[in-house]
Structures are given as structure tokens and as C-alpha cells.
Amino acid sequence: MLASSVLCWADDVRVSSPNGSLVVTVSDAEGKLSYTATLDGKQMLAPSALGLQTSLGDLTKELSIVNSQLSTVANSYSMRGTKASKVDYKANALTINLQNKDGVKFSILFQVSDNDIAYRYQMPRQTIRRREYKRVRILSEVSGFNFPEGTTTFISPQIGPETGWEQTKPSYEEGYSNDAPMDKASQYGHGYIFPALFHLPTGWALVSETGVTSGYCGSHLSDYLAGSGYTVAYPDKGENNGFGTDFAAIPLPGETPWRTITLGSTLKPILETTISYDVVETRYQASTDYKAGRYTWSWLIGQDNSINYDDQVRFIDLASAMGFEYCLVDNWWDQNIGRERIAELSKYAQSKGVHLLMWYNSNGFWNDAPQTPRNCMNTAVAREKEMSWLESIGVKGIKVDFFGGDKQQTMQLYEDILSDANRHGLQVVFHGCTVPRGWERMYPNFVASEAVLASENLFFGEGATISEGFDLTLHPFCRNATASMDWGGIIMNKFMSTDNKSRHSRKTTDIFELASGITMQTSVQCVAMQPNNLQELPQFEMDFLRELPTTWEETRFIDGYPGKYVVMARKATNGKWYIAGLNAQKEPLALTLDLKAFGDLTKLLVDDKQMQPVQTALKKDKKGKIKVVIQPNGGMIIK
């Protein structure tokens, strides 16, 4: 990976992307470290602070650059479950070696690809005042993201600890701003979560972090401060019910996770970025060939009353009829069905070509959520017993809910669950949780996390059904751009009830819901059909759901604006292209699409003027273009 090495002694040091368009400049002027970024000569990032507060000393001021080295990075990898199955990552790297006035040494490593910046801090084992230091506490960062004036935001507030239902928050389930000014204070006074999307006067920026393991805490963004921008913030002391540290503790030599910034003059680099995975490594090998697929889920509409043996048989039969691979059995199954009958249910599912996924409370004392099973996932001894049983009855995955925040101790729990589950051939979905940070590549049995105000809220209240269009046209550019997202359901019922006649209605069209199965990315996708849908849906909708891919070879941006509309193309790992569009606006959206790059596409699924779903033959003009209208809260699929 090291292609060249150059020593630089100037106060300012620079590194540019392989194509030369993205340039990062680092300065130690007046003893404080900062960086800027330009794209095609346009300022994208104003001077933004760098530095750490540590138990070894203050590494935010009275700093000097000792030397720096330039190198090149070339990394090709394959993985399942994200927007691209094969990636060739090329970047230029800059290592800056620094010290403070007391001689405390540290480094910053920048890697700059054509539209992405990733950087992290590194600290060596070192001797200070005749004492050798082999460990350090990282107390805070001043790492900043200072965007130009006039930038607007699509960001979600961090909520305080032990809030929400049964003190289960923070859980990354708050709403997003919509082109809001940067100086608008966060709703709860705790800053903002990752990922965070910004609309600059000169383009777009997506900020996040990746590579968080059991060896570090998760972080988020502070509130905006004029002149400084946003700063990396560590967990609140009250998270995890007050247990654990609000700082990170690492051995030396050691390093922080990566802070990432994706920059583009358009939204194309934002939607297509793979930086979350480019700079991390696999932590362990898969114990088995984990299968992607689709799952049914009774709880979304049926809630707790549906967690009984007979209803779960109905949803297993539904999965079998649709050719889906899995059925998720949600909370209270140990009490409402019992372990012996769950073993019977798993055997029945397998006889129908379906495997079960089982829900668990993460437990411990960090929340008051009463749902069971509890005390099964919070210790190594309990996990080994439970996962051995699950493996013995043929269960293929678990959904673990209600975590305690972003402290290092909680990150260790995530990693321990994943590692132990891999030993027993179990895939893992997290809910009520933090956002994934490169985990699809780091942990091969990791599927997705919720970490979003997801589909269950459509059942809870009509407000979420009204905002569904905004949410699902935003997340391809934000939440789902950096990590897999378990939204929790392509919903085909017209009403949020088991009889499909009562309670409040879904506000999106059938084609919108079908298209969301392509615009949302996760390797095990929830299709929240109900058994009644087998008799209610048009045949072409059923056919599409039966063929719906969940793993992708390539993803391309076509058009869109966060919260308004999105049009994107994905090439499935079976080689077929799918183009999907969603329109969250109040007016029809007329588009002219150039399809020459996407091979032999023959069918169009769209809503007509009466908002009814139709499938027609695709009609291209002589230049390979088509004209299509996506109705309000409607969708489009070309295949």
C-alpha cells in the first residue's frame, strides 16, 4: 500500500485525490491544527479544528508538525449486503506526525479518494518524562466540520439518555431537518447523530464515522458554533444507565475510528459512496455461507397479539407462498408460544422452505423495556447457551433490541453479540440501537440496524404515514448511504390494521412501496405483507415481490433531491438492472430518463393518474430515452 514517501517540513501540508479534484490542506498555524478541503477549486470545508484531549496531555494547542509522509492506497475487496459487491478503492494518504510542547507525540492519517476524505488519530507507545506510557484515555476531540455560510442541513438530533418509552433512548429514532439553517439549535441540546447531510452553496457533504469496534466509543456531532462549525462529541455520561465511561480507553500504540466526509458538486457521490467500508477490515471470517433474502413479520400490523403459534404458522405459510427465505418471530415468544413449541415451529418452517429469525431484548440494566426474552444476550454465558439452542433447532438469525447508547462498553456488547452469533451460524439485526459504522464489512454476519424512525411508527400514528415519503426519499442520501438500514417493511396493506379496513391509512401507493424495496438497502429485507394480501394484490405486484433482489453488484444515482424525490439504479448480483423512483412531493414529477447504460429493460411499473398501479411494456425513443410521470407519494420501477 505504501507507494512513495516524501518528507514535508512546511507549516501547511496537502494531499489530493487520485484525480486531483479533491484537495485537503492541513495547517499548524499558531500551534493549532486545522484542515480545509476544496473540490474542483471550490471551497467545501472552511478551516476546521483537529486535535484530542487525552490523559497524556492536551493535543489541541501548542502543536507543531514534525514531519509528514505521502503514500498511495489501493485496496480491492468483495462483500455482500451493501450497495456494491466489489469495490476498487484508490486513495492518496497523508500521515502527519505531531507533538505538543511537552513532547507528547501523535499522528493524523488522512486518506483522500476522488470524493471521500477519511481521517483518524494514531498514538504511539512513548516515554514522557522518563515514564513509558502503554495506554491512554481519549477524553474528547475538537475534530471539526466547518461548512461555508449558507449551508443547510438534513440532520437528526441526538436525544438525551434514559428518555423515551421505558427509558430506551437514545436510539437514533428522531426526525430529520429539511434544509434547515446550521445555526438552528438541536431539539434536545445534545447535538446531532451520524450520518449528517449538508447542502453547501458549492455542493453536498455527508459526514459520518466508521470502524468503531469494542475498542472505542461511538460519537456524534455537537451543536453548531459560528466560526467553528460542528465538532465530534462523545457519549453522554448518563447513557447505558450511567454505567461505563463517556470517553474511550485504548492501549498504545492505538488509534481512533475514522471520521469520514463525502463531498460532491452533485448528489451522485453521496448516494454512491462506499467510504464506510473502504477503510475498514474484516474482524473475523464467516462461519457459514450467510444467505440474503426477504422475511415476513406479523408484529408490524398484528403487534403483540399476533405472537402466537397459529399466527406465526400463517406468516410462515405466507413466506413460503411468496418464496421468501425467512419469517421473524417478535417479542414475548418465549411466554406466548414457549420454547418447546418454538422448536416445533422452526421444524415446520423448514418443512416449508423457510427459516426463523428470533427477537431478543438486549437486556442488562440499561433500560426498563419489559419484553422478553430477557437475560439471554447480555452475558457471554447466557449467549452461548441461547445461541447453541437456536442453532440446534435450525434458527438462522436474531433481532436484538433496546441498547443503551454509544459508550465503549455498549460497543463491546454489539461486537460480542456478533462474534458469538457467528460461531453458531446466526445473522444479526439490531433495533433500538446505534447506527452501524462499517459493520457490514467488519462483521460478516451483520445484516442491518434500525437506527431510524422506522416503519413501526406508521402503525403507531398517522403522522408517520404522512412523513413516509419524505423519510424514504431522504435516506438514500443520508442514513442508508453509509450503512444498511432495517426500515422494517414494504407495507402492502392499505390500512394499518389486520382487517385492512380500519385505523388510519397508508399514504403511499403500492408502487411507491414496491420501489422502496430497491431504494432501501439491506441484504435481508422485510416485506411486511399480510396473509390477506395474497388475495388482494394484482398478480404483477406479487410477481415483483417474489423476484425482489436484496444483494447488489452496483448502485448508481440518476436524479433526486433529499426529502423530495429519488431515482436510482441498482444492478442485482444476478446481473439484472432495476431502476426505482419515489416522489414525496404534492405534484406529479415528470422525468426523461436515459436508459442506454442499463441493458435490456422491458417493463414499467407506475401509478396512473387515478393513482392505480399498472404494469406496461417499456417504450423507448430512438435515443434510448423514456418519459415517465411519478405521481405524488407514488413510485416507479423499470426492469
Image (tube, rainbow, N blue to C red):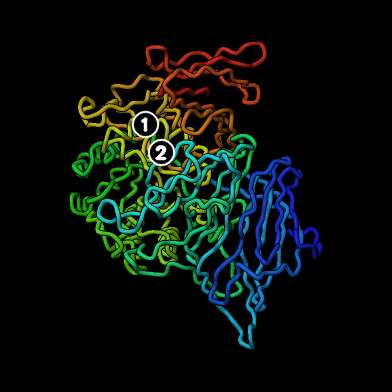
Please name the amino acid that badge 2 sits on: Arg
Q: Which mark is residue 274?
A: none
Q: Nearer the viewer, residue 256 or 521?
A: 256
Q: Nearer the viewer, residue 375 or 59?
A: 59
Q: Residue at x 45, y 51 (%)?
A: 193
Tell me: residue 532, above or below residue 187. Answer: above
Q: Is residue 267 visible from the viewing direction of this image? A: yes
* SS at mark 1 in the image: helix
Please name the residue that numbered disc 1 is placed on: 322
Tell me: residue 64, above or below residue 195. Answer: below
Mark nearest the camera among 2 and 1 is: 2
- Number of marks: 2
Q: Quadrant of residue 29?
A: bottom right
Q: Residue at x 47, y 22 (%)?
A: 636
Image quarter where the N terminus lies is: bottom right
Tell me: residue 518, above or below residue 30. Answer: above
Where is residue 36 drawn, in percent x and y?
67, 51
Please name the residue that numbered disc 2 is placed on: 294
Q: Is residue 528 left or right of residue 35?
A: left
Asked if the residues shown at circle 2 and circle 1 are in contact, with their CB atoms under 8 angstroms apart, the answer is: yes
Q: Is residue 398 visible from the viewing direction of this image? A: no
Q: Is residue 151 left or right of residue 540?
A: right
Where is residue 445 drawn, in percent x and y?
47, 53
* SS at mark 2 in the image: strand
Please name the amino acid that badge 1 sits on: Met
The answer for how far apart the CA atoms under marks 2 and 1 are is 10 Å
Where is residue 582 drawn, in percent x and y?
46, 27
Q: Is residue 506 left or right of residue 541?
A: left
Q: Nearer the viewer, residue 183 or 130?
A: 183
Q: Residue at x 67, y 14 (%)?
A: 623
Where is residue 480 drawn, in percent x and y?
49, 42
Q: Earlier in the sequence, mark 2 or mark 1?
A: 2
